[in-house]
Image (cartoon, rainbow, N blue to C red):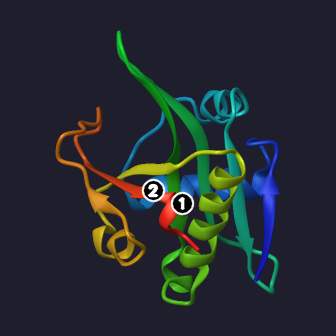
Amino acid sequence: MDNITITDFTDPRFTDMFRRYFGELNIAVRDWDGLFREMNGGENSAVMSIAPDGHAAGFIQFCPMSFESWFFSFRAGFIREFWVEPESRGRGIGTELLHLAEESFKRAGLRRAILTTDTAEGFYRRFGYVPAPDIGAKNSDTVFIRDLEKIS
């Protein structure tokens, strides 16, 4: 597998894969083009895994995120979206993509990674992510957090 960094979220390889991902989750989107254009703003990054036959087998989308209150603030790496096509699961693609995002966070000086999931708790737990029951997410999914300083 080859990994390529996405710099344009309107890239047809990415948009096709993202539509398959949302289809698997049964999420309807009214304005796909608007969604992909919106992803191009800010500090979003993504990496796609490309199979030997050239098709996109998975991706991870991530960004640094600031969390603010009236007194405290901190930044963490946020795993926004993450998907590996069903036919390619169990082959290490997800592991590789997750590690690439975490390494990007560490290079940016971020000490924590945070995400939500309702489908892959076991996967994240294997890599040291723990539930954070005191942190709520707007999508109501379980929030997981990992201390990146514990990664060697």
Please give the residue where the numbered disc 1 appears in the rendered image. 20
Q: Is residue 12 left or right of residue 79?
A: right
The residue located at (39%, 46%) in the rendering is 27
Q: Element under label 2? A: helix
Q: Quadrant of residue 151?
A: bottom right
Quarter of the rendering occupied by the C terminus: bottom right
> Mark 2 is on which residue type?
Gly
> Mark 1 is on which residue type?
Arg
Q: Element under label 1? A: helix
Q: Residue furthest bottom?
A: 91
Q: Residue furthest left?
A: 133
The residue located at (71%, 64%) in the rendering is 48
Q: Is residue 70 left or right of residue 64?
A: left
The residue located at (29%, 32%) in the rendering is 138
Q: Is residue 123 above or below residue 78?
A: below
Front residue of 100/76: it is 76
Task: Return the x and y of residue 105 as percentages of the image width and height.
Answer: 63, 51
Quarter of the rendering occupied by the N terminus: bottom right
Q: Quadrant of residue 146?
A: bottom left
Front residue of 110/92: it is 110
Q: Is residue 34 above or below residue 63?
A: above
Disc ID at residue 23 = 2
Question: Dot 2, crowdedness within 10 Å: few (<14), some or many (≥20)?
Answer: few
Question: Dot 1, crowdedness within 10 Å: few (<14), some or many (≥20)?
Answer: some
Task: Return the x and y of residue 34 as percentages of the image width and height.
Answer: 64, 27
The residue located at (42%, 49%) in the rendering is 114
The span from disc 2 to disc 1 (Cα, nearest Å) is 5 Å
Disc ID at residue 70 = none
Front residue of 45/18: it is 45
Q: Quadrant of residue 97?
A: bottom right
Label pair 2/1, CB-CB below 8 angstroms: yes
